[in-house]
Image (cartoon, grey):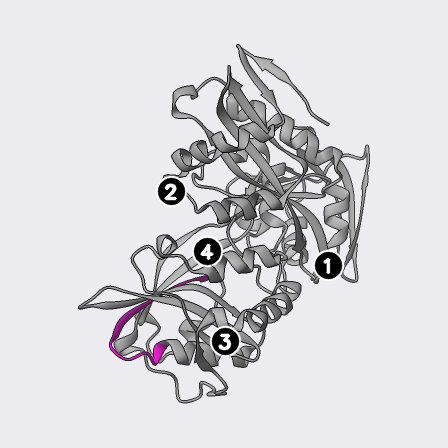
Amino acid sequence: MSTSTTLDQLVLRSPTDADWAQTTLLHGVSFGHFEHADTYAVARDLIADDGAVVVCDDDAVVGMAAYFDFAFTVPGGAVVPMAGVSMVGVAPTHRRRGVLRAMYVELHRRIAEAGYPLAGLTASEGGIYGRFGYGPATMERVLTIDRRFAKFHSDAPDPGGARIIRPAEHGDALAAIYERWRRQTPGGIRRVQGLWDDLLADREDDRDGGTELVGILHEDGYVLYRVCGTETLKVRVEEFKAVTTDAHVALTRGLLGLDLVETVELGTYARDPLPYLLTDSRVARTTKYEDDLWLRIMDVPAALETRIYQADVSTVIEVSDQFAGSGGRFALDIRNGRARCRPTDAPPQVSMDLDVLGSLYLGVHQVVPLALANRVRATDSMVLPRLQAAFLSDVPAHLGFPF
């Protein structure tokens, strides 16, 4: 289906073949980086059927947005469809005309019509997407480790089994490990072969001043990294996936065993236990802690009934969605790890905006701190700790890859 809408002499519609050449320019201007043609082609292949819109001023494309068709892991290991919103840009010449909102209205209408229970995105700016019902659902924690002074506790395990590799020569092994990792990890996304091919192509303009990719491989995990600098060397980890604790420790030991390297920079998840392996946790400094994946709950009952919970609770939740009407009042009954969620007219005991529910969904953010900020409100405060305990995840959430 193709929709055409006019807003102040601008036209919003599905893109034609002739539009895509223009979108590469808009994408490069919007993100300050012009991607390789093959990278852009892979992204286009991920777009769902009728999953893109453009805004045109005469023949010029001045706005674009799309969503990818993703398979997404939620707490408990269920894999559900997620619309991964991406490739969003508005020309600097056409700001403040309602272009972004118009694209989002149409794009989310299509996402809802297609039956996705969840929509997700990664945000270049943190203050934009809450009004569209998105809440930060995973957090990226960057650890900067002074390798020279990093010493392991005497009781830290030393499982071994890791070796240095050239990643492009081990693509099948890396993909198999990632597939195991993403199926057990909330936030994991299925990575199609085109994405692997693009990653392992390791083009010069993707290295951001670093060396070619180097890998450390374990049968249950891997690290991909680059070395940056000349006199003072820094390792920048591009990806670290460990299916088991032994793999996590073995890969960490491999990274911190790199001679001549002063610092190791690792983007990881909030609850990464790496600092606890060291005699002095201060050498693993948190130098960044920032939102990573943002989630919008498109279908509240479907989304809440899909995941597994850690405690029992029964309550009535009112969810407000000022953007696209996905909210409502719901009776939520969680027993033995499973939820039953149904619309109800009963008085609400707990109320929140839709973006807050998105933040709670993967178990990273918690109910009680959000209540202290008045983002969650309750008629009976005793229900809040029970709701918080229920939404925790036994496996820490971690976004599979940025998009």
Neighbor class of circle 1 (other Cα within 10 Å; few <14, some 14-19, many 20+) is some
Residue 37 appears left or right of 375 = left
Q: Evaluate whether residue 269 shows in this view.
A: no
Return the residue at label 4: 140
Which of marks 1 and 4 precedes in the sequence?
1
Secondary structure found at label 4 = strand
| Residue beneath disc 1 | 78
| Front one among 203 and 329 | 203
Task: Tell me which label, 3 or 4, sits earlier in the chain.
Answer: 4
Of marks 2 and 4, the one in the foreground: 2
Q: Nearer the viewer, residue 55 or 121?
A: 55
Residue identifier under label 2: 33
Q: Is residue 135 above or below residue 290?
A: above
Considering every residue shown, the one lying at the far top of the view is 9
Q: Which mark is residue 248?
A: 3
Q: Amino acid at mark 2?
A: His
Nearer the camera: disc 3 or disc 2: 2
On the image, the x and y values in percent for residue 178 come to: 58, 67
- Left or right: where 13 falls relative to 241: right
Q: Name the dominant secondary structure of the magenta segment.
A: strand
Question: 244 above or below 360?
Answer: below
Residue 323, quarter of the rendered image: top right
> How dense is the environment of label 3, judged by Cα within 10 Å: few (below 14), some, or many (20 and up)?
many
Q: Magenta residues, as a range?
A: 256-269
- For marks 3 and 1, give the CA distance: 23 Å
CA separation, marks 2 and 4?
A: 22 Å
Instruction: Check if mark 2's residue and mark 1's residue have beta carbons within 8 Å.
Output: no
The answer to whether 203 is drawn above or below residue 159 in the figure is above
Displayed quadrant of residue 78: bottom right
Calculate the distance from the C-alpha at mark 3 to the C-alpha at mark 4. Answer: 17 Å
